[in-house]
């Protein structure tokens, strides 16, 4: 062994011993701090201990915490306070993003980097709205939107790239299926009592019909895409999709139905796909689309000025009035939380909401973000990309008739896209490792000779 190699080994051993000593010293100090806090402030001791445990788990299995957090990403229960009104989904997403950001597998896939850059561009285009309109909800929503997009992508990537893609999809699907079971059960109970009004699920917490309908519609789109690597058999998928579609029908969320039909339409007619999908399904969905169209026409011709269709038209007109105040940079995110305008509603359309909040510049950033996300998902191997396409299309179509920037509904499509990108990267790396192992095994006999 040369002197230079010996010196390098000794230097490496010295650094390792120094790191070990630093780790032990840090552990002792942390233990003393926790012991002290356990007496004076037990809540802080519990939080620090949980954080240390999470760091240890993340070091051993980088994708485990984001994986465990996936079902909680679907919980819309409000937990904010002090002027910050966020959902449990938002807090869990932020907590899962930290290990996903620092411990996720690198390098990121080109598609993931492209959507992250598009997300940064959208944030840049909405920054002027934050600067021009200084109030708390504006700044909070600016960071919230970035977390829903970029955080969702990173959490999904961490799950998929670390080999948990199959389990991740199943966790999301079965959590949505549990919500569908509750919705259908409550709907049947209402029907038995002669109540045919829309179902607002109340278990395990109260939910709006459009939230439950949208989530079940996204779940149905995921089940219909049914990627092979998710391990969902055809009979199970039929049962799950029937259950979720029934839940959407019980909520009477028309926008969720239209979003699901849009996703199915795109997957059926897509030429580059992972498997054949019968076009006969479009004939079965046609009566539903016709029924929804007729209901909307009846409401537009109704004398009731407060039905959902006419109310939306009124909101659109009022939104354009707000937008005219500052057409280029907008009046601020979550402007309806302020008293600057006589209107206090969130515009029920994705583009109009962005237009009023961040102006033409923000709308440009939003369009770029969505086009890049759709392009990346479309260019993925259909084995992985069909799932991302289905969820993104369903959410975008649904967002033309309802609130877009809302917890869960906005983050879930990007979580799924990141998960699909990560699952493809993990499959490619596994295939490369297997090929290298086979090549090494085949070369050994030759060397022995």
Image (cartoon, rainbow, N blue to C red):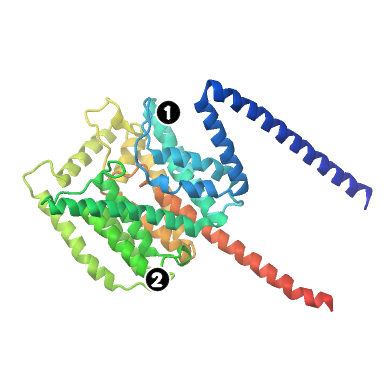
Residue 165 drawn above or below residue 98: below
At x 26%, y 55%, the residue is 247
For label 1, the residue is 131
Estimate the x, y position of residue 116 in percent, counting from the top left. Answer: 50, 47
Give the SS element for disc 1.
Answer: helix
The tag on residue 271 is 2
**Sequence order check, earlier mark of 1 and 2:** 1
- Where residue 376 sits in the image (x, y, percent)? 47, 57
Distance from the alpha carbon under mark 1 to that under mark 2: 45 Å
Give the answer, above or below, for where 110 lies relative to 23: below
Q: Residues within 10 Å of mark 2 (few under 14, many from 20)?
A: few
Badge 1, how many Cα within 10 Å: few under 14, some, many 20+? few
Which element carries disc 2, helix, strand or loop? loop
Q: Is residue 77 visible?
A: yes
| Residue 42 horizontal side relative to residue 106, left or right | left
Q: Residue furthest top?
A: 40
Examine the image and state in which quarter residue 285 appears: bottom left
Q: How far from the left and from the top, in percent, is residue 335? A: 31, 31
Q: Quadrant of the C terminus?
A: bottom right
Residue 252 in view in this figure: no
């Amino acid at each position: 062994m040369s002197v230079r190699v010996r010196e390098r080994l000794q230097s490496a051993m010295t650094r390792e011993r120094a790191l070990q000593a630093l780790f032990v010293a840090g552990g002792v100090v942390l233990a003393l701090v926790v012991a002290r806090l356990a007496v004076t402030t037990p809540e802080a001791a519990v939080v620090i201990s949980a954080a240390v445990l999470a760091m240890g788990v993340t070091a051993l299995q980088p994708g485990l915490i984001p994986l465990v957090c996936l079902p909680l990403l679907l919980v819309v229960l409000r937990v904010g306070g002090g002027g910050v009104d966020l959902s449990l989904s938002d807090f869990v997403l932020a907590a899962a993003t930290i290990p996903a950001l620092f411990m996720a597998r690198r390098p990121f896939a080109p598609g993931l980097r492209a959507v992250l850059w598009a997300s940064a561009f959208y944030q840049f285009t909405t920054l002027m709205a934050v600067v021009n309109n200084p109030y708390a909800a504006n700044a909070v929503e600016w960071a919230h939107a970035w977390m829903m997009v970029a955080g969702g992508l990173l959490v999904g990537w961490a799950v998929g790239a670390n080999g948990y893609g199959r389990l991740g999809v199943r966790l999301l699907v079965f959590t949505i299926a549990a919500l569908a079971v509750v919705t259908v059960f409550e709907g049947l109970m209402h029907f038995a009592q002669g109540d045919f009004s829309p179902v607002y699920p109340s278990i395990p917490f109260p939910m709006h019909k459009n939230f439950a309908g949208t989530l079940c519609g996204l779940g149905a789109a995921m089940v219909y895409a049914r990627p092979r690597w998710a391990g969902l058999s055809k009979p199970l998928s039929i049962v799950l999709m029937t259950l979720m579609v029934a839940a959407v029908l019980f909520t009477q969320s028309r926008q969720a139905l239209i979003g699901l039909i849009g996703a199915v339409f795109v997957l059926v007619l897509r030429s580059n796909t992972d498997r054949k999908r019968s076009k006969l399904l479009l004939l079965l969905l046609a009566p539903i689309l016709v029924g929804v169209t007729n209901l909307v026409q009846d409401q537009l011709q109704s004398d009731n000025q407060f039905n959902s269709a006419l109310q939306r038209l009124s909101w659109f007109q009022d939104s354009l009035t707000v937008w005219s105040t500052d057409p280029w940079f907008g009046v601020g995110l979550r402007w309806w939380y302020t008293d600057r305008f006589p209107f206090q509603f969130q515009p029920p359309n994705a583009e109009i909401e962005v237009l009023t909040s961040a102006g033409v510049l923000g709308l440009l950033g939003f369009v770029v973000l969505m086009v890049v996300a759709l392009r990346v998902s479309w260019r993925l191997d259909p084995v992985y990309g069909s799932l991302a396409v289905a969820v993104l299309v369903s959410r975008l179509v649904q967002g033309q008739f309802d609130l877009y920037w809302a917890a869960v509904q906005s983050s879930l499509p990007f979580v799924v896209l990141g998960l699909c990108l990560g699952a493809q990267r993990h499959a490619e790396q596994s295939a490369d490792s297997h090929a290298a192992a086979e090549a090494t095994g085949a070369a050994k006999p030759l060397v022995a000779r």
